[in-house]
Image (cartoon, rainbow, N blue to C red):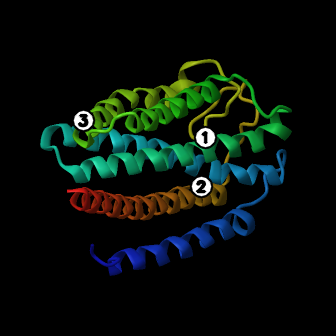
Amino acid sequence: MKDKPKLLTVLDGVTLVTFLAATAMVFFYAPTERVMGAVQKVFYFHVAAGWVGMVSFFVAAVVGVIYLIKKSPNMDLIGIAAVEIGIIFTLINIVTGAIWARPIWNAWWTWDPRLTTATIMELVYIAYLMLRQGIDDPERRARFGAVYAIVGFLSVPLTFFSIRIFRTIHPVVIGGSDPSAVGAFDMTPKMFQTLMFSIVVFSILFIDLIWHRVRLGKFQNYLEELKIKLQV
C-alpha cells in the first residue's frame, strides 16, 4: 500500500486551520442574534453539517451510477465512504437542531416536516449499511449498494424542499418569509459571511474525510486479499 500522499497531509492542515477560523468567526465575528441570543450560533454548524450530509448522499448516488456502468471497485469505496460520512453529519445536523430548538420551540423535538423527513432520510441510509452487512459477495454487495444509494437519494430532495412545500415552523435559512416559522431571523452581512465560510469549511472537511475513508477501505480490501491468499 502507498504511503499517505503529501497532498492529503496538506489538506489535513488546511482543514484544521480553516475549521478553527470558522469557529472563531462564529463566536467572535458574527454578532449575537438579538432575540435568540447565544444559542443562535449553533445555526452555523447546524446548516453546514446538513449541507455536508446532503452532498455526501448526492456523491453516493453519482458514484453508484458510475459503478453500475464501469464496475469500478474505487467507486464502491467512495460510495460507502460518502454514505458513512453523510450519516454522521446528518446526525450532527439533527442533534444541533435539537439544541437550538429547546430554548426556541420549548421542545427538543417536534414532528415538523423538516425534522420528520430528515429522520426518515437518516434511517434510509442506516438501512443501506445494514444491507451491505448482510451480503457476503463483494461484487453483489457493491451492485446492491449502488442501486440502493441511487434510489435512497429520493429522500434527500424531499428533505430539502420539505420546508418550502409543507406548512412548517422550521425557518427557511435563505429566502424564507413564512411568518409561522418560529425562530426565523434576518441575517446581517457578518452572519451571512460566517454561514458561507462555515459551509465552505465543512465542504473541505468532507473532502478530507472521504479521502481518508477511501484509503482505509483500500487497506481493508488489501487485508481481505491477504487472508484469502493465506487460506489457499
- The residue depicted at 35 percent of the width and 77 percent of the height is 4
Considering only vertical position in the picture, is 19 above or below 47? Answer: below
Q: Which residue is mark 1?
A: 173
Tag 3's secondary structure? helix
Q: Residues within 10 Å of mark 3 (few under 14, many from 20)?
A: few
Q: Residue 73 at x, y = what percent?
A: 22, 50
Residue 149: image quadrant is: top left
Question: For residue 140, which numbered disc appears in the image?
Answer: 3
Query: Which residue is at the front of the view, 195 or 230?
Result: 230
Alpha-carbon distance for marks 1 and 2? 10 Å
Q: Quadrant of residue 20?
A: bottom right
Query: Do the numbered discs 3 and 2 sit on residues whose CB atoms are within 8 Å?
Result: no
Amino acid tagged 2: Leu
In the image, which disc is placed on residue 195? 2
The kind of residue on which mark 1 rests is Val
Drawn side of residue 167 relative to residue 224, left or right: right
**Comes first in the chain, label 1 or label 2:** 1
Identify the element where label 1 is drawn.
Answer: loop
Whether residue 55 is visible here, answered yes or no, is no
**Marks 1 and 2 in Cβ contact (< 8 Å):** yes
Q: CA distance from mark 1 to mark 3?
A: 41 Å
For this rendering, which residue is in front, 225 or 86?
225
Q: Residue furthest left?
A: 70
Pick whichever of labels 3 and 2 is earlier in the sequence: 3
Quadrant in which the C terminus is drawn: bottom left
- Left or right: where 63 falls relative to 102: left
- Mark 3 or mark 1, which is nearer the start of the sequence? 3
Where does the image place residue 115, in percent across and percent down from the top left?
64, 29
Which residue is drawn at the image coordinates 41% and 61% (left, top)? 207
